[in-house]
Amino acid sequence: MTDVTNTNLQMCPSRIDAAPVLFAHKVTQGQCQDRQRGSYHKCFTCAFNNAYVAKHGKTVPVLAGAERAQVG
């Protein structure tokens, strides 16, 4: 298994409106792009969505409880 530092991870999904999500995962940028290409059902509301970033610029989403997210 590849060791990935926490600085390379982002929460998936990170809602544009900062609303809490029931299930979130820490993913790499590559995994995020794979999910977008595969039309992952949460991508359309995500702050890391390529279409949203192209129109509004990259934002730093507020992630309530991100430090408690379980990765497994």
Image (cartoon, grey):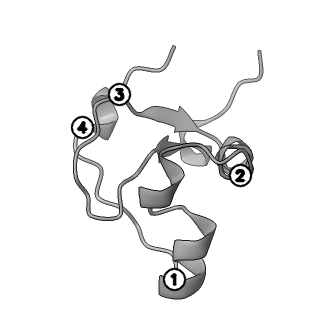
List the residue tagged with mark 4.
65
User: Which amino acid type is marked by label 2?
Assistant: Gln
User: Can you see residue 46?
Assistant: no
- Quadrant location of the N terminus in the rendered image: top right
Q: Residue at x 52, y 52 (%)?
A: 43
How far apart are labels 4 and 1 at the CA level?
A: 24 Å
Mark 3: secondary structure? loop
List the residue tagged with mark 2.
33
User: Which amino acid type is marked by label 3?
Assistant: Ala
Relative horizontal placement of residue 2, taking residue 36 as reference (left or right): right
Within 10 angstroms of label 1, few (less than 14), some, or many (20 or more) residues?
few
Query: Of marks 4 and 1, which one's residue comes earlier in the chain?
Result: 1
Q: Residue at x 67, y 32 (%)?
A: 4
Within 10 angstroms of label 3, few (less than 14), some, or many (20 or more) residues?
few
Q: Cβ–Cβ below 8 Å for labels 4 and 3?
A: yes
Mark 4: secondary structure? loop
The image shows residue 64, relative to residue 68, as above or below, that is: below
